[in-house]
Image: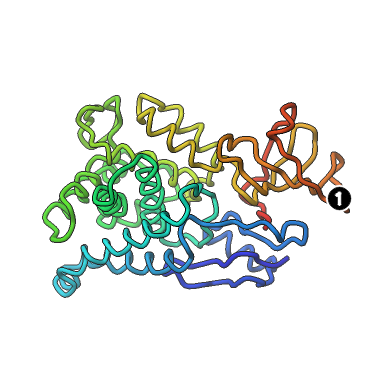
Amino acid sequence: MRLAKKIYNDEGVVLLSVDAELTNGIIRKLHNHGLDYVYIQDADTDDIVVEDIITSETRRKALQEIQVGFRSLIDPQAQKKNYPLIGRSFSGVVDSILNDISTDPEVMIMLMNIHVKDQYLYHHSLNVCIYTLLLGKVHGYSTEELHVLGIGSLLHDIGKIRIPSSILSKPERLTDLEYEEIKLHTEYGFKMLKDEPGIPLLAAHCAYQHHERLNGSGYPRGITEPDIHDYAKWIAIADSYDALTTSRVYRSALLPHQALEVLYAGYGTMYDKYMMEIFKSRVAIYPIGLTVVLSNGLKGVVVHIHKSITQRPIIRILYNEAGERLASPYDLDLLAHHSIVIAGVEGLNTHMHT
């Protein structure tokens, strides 16, 4: 079994290249690093193209800039040395993401960011920024508005660098006191950003408000819908989705359709209805490369997503009802076969095809 997509570490450096052999030992190591799935080569699915929202080069450079920038914000010496380049650095990350998003106005959010997650914060911050900018672009924000939204979403969790790692990475249930400490990251982030040169003040408010909810059930202030800035509402959705679909030390990742079910439990009460509909329209519920089981017993891989009805993709059938590999796989369009539905998916602890 060989790798079909590169695997990166937290610095954006390639750990395993395409064609690397996935031995049992390597698979165990990847799983121990929090990697729940990889794309593997398969002659019957080699024609499937799984594109990220941004290029791998943009992602690599962005992660490097985020690491340096985050460390500079918490280290007074580094902060003084890099002044006023910190804001410019984050602006460059946002501009590069916007440039990539602009090349494909129909791009979808796929479950496909393959990296080991030894340091969750950097990847999470980048993903939330990507998702939020995509949603903001669909909504119709101007370039200037998107820039501020991008900075706010990129730095929404910056306050977590002041939370002890023993709490952030704790595998057991948090105590009440530890949970209260976690919640302080919103206030820490606001205080870190509000007077930072080159960082829009509104970005600081995004850090402050992204855990507020429309019905007042959020934190830190428990404010309600009229008092929450729209940027924070967008970020709240992207933040929750990425957190749910990422494996953590205390739980496994959810698949896109599972994460959407969780978010929709707060439809209109925690998350804005209009924003949720835009988000749903851009999420690949069953991402390309995912192995699915159909209601008729057949099993195959998602090869194409209909942008209008994402829950009815085209499936390349690889196995018959008895679980036997087909000598001649074929494509089945669920949009044209209304009686057939996706009954199950292969868990994230298995491998995705490409």
Query: Which residue is found at the position 77% from the left and 43% from the top?
Result: 299
Give left or right: position of 335 versus 6: right
Residue 175 is situated, as x and y percent measured from the top left of the image, at 34, 41
Image quarter in which the N terminus is found: bottom right
Image quarter in which the C terminus is found: bottom right
The mark tally for this picture is 1
Which residue is situated farthest in the left direction here?
Answer: 195
Residue 205 is situated, as x and y percent measured from the top left of the image, at 20, 44
Give left or right: position of 220 versus 337: left
Query: Which residue is found at the position 35% from the left and 55% from the top?
Result: 166
Residue 331 is situated, as x and y percent measured from the top left of the image, at 76, 45
Under mark 1, the amino acid is Leu
**Disc 1 marks which residue?**
326
Look at the picture and state if 104 lies above or below 33: above
Query: Which residue is found at the position 50% from the left and 62% from the top?
Result: 116
Give left or right: position of 207 versus 346: left
Residue 161 is situated, as x and y percent measured from the top left of the image, at 28, 57
- Judged from the image, the secondary structure of the residue bearing numbered disc 1 is strand
Query: Which residue is found at the position 45% from the left and 27% from the top?
Result: 265
Look at the picture and state if 99 lies above or below 65: above
